[in-house]
Amino acid sequence: MTNTTPNKKLLIVDDSKVSRMVIKARVKDVQPDWEIIEAANGDEGIAAVTAHAPDFCTMDINMPGMLGTDAAEQILKIAPNTRIVIFSANIQGSFQDRACAMGAIFVAKPVTEKSIAEAVQYFLR
């Protein structure tokens, strides 16, 4: 019997199609009932929040256009109950501090089974 949380929506915002595919596949393994929405940059992510009202969001930092941390802050203004995990290879303390300040958690890339499990555990808390 799988431990699933039904009818939840996860928005994956990452300019790397590979990262989005890996996150989606791993999350679907453990939460097959979740709806997955993808966006390739911050502007698409913000539009997806308005259109789909996701419960959870994974956000890359370094993407074309706006930084993921800026997009995450805008998403939280639109939908303050969205739980956000910042995934990034950019592990500077300032980015980690900013993630914490907005109530998100920071998970270092590369995206792995372990890092995705950490994100899912945060979403389910």
Image (cartoon, rainbow, N blue to C red):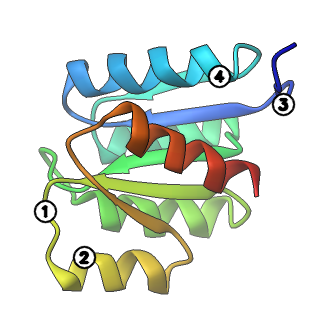
Q: Secondary structure at mark 3?
A: loop
Identify whether 2 is placed above or below 74: above
Q: Is residue 77 left or right of residue 41?
A: right
Q: Which residue is mark 4?
A: 30
Where residue 47 appears, x then y in whole percent? 49, 39
**In percent of the image, x 58 and y 66: which residue is there?**
76
- Pointer 2 with pointer 1, Cβ within 8 A: yes
Number of numbered discs visible in the structure rendering: 4
**Where's the C terminus, which quadrant?**
bottom right
**Of discs 1 and 4, which sits in the foreground?**
4
Where residue 17 appears, x then y in whole percent? 23, 19
Q: On the image, which quarter does residue 95 sit in?
A: bottom left
Q: Is residue 104 left or right of residue 59?
A: right
Q: Rounded to the nearest whole Å, what is the CA distance between mark 4 and mark 2?
A: 28 Å
Q: Which residue is mark 3?
A: 5
Mark 4 or mark 1, which is nearer the start of the sequence?
4
Mark 3 or mark 2, which is nearer the start of the sequence?
3
Q: Rounded to the nearest whole Å, what is the CA distance between mark 3 and mark 1?
A: 31 Å
**Of discs 3 and 4, which sits in the foreground?**
4
Q: On the image, which quarter does residue 69 sit in?
A: bottom left
**Of discs 4 and 2, which sits in the foreground?**
4
Mark 4 or mark 3, which is nearer the start of the sequence?
3
Which amino acid type is marked by label 1?
Asn
Which amino acid type is marked by label 3?
Thr
Residue 73, label in figure: none
Q: Rounded to the nearest whole Å, what is the CA distance between mark 2 and mark 3?
A: 30 Å
Q: On the image, which quarter does residue 114 sit in?
A: top left
Residue 90, label in figure: 1
Q: Rounded to the nearest whole Å, what is the CA distance between mark 3 and mark 4?
A: 10 Å
**Where's the N terminus, which quadrant?**
top right
Q: Which residue is mark 2?
A: 95
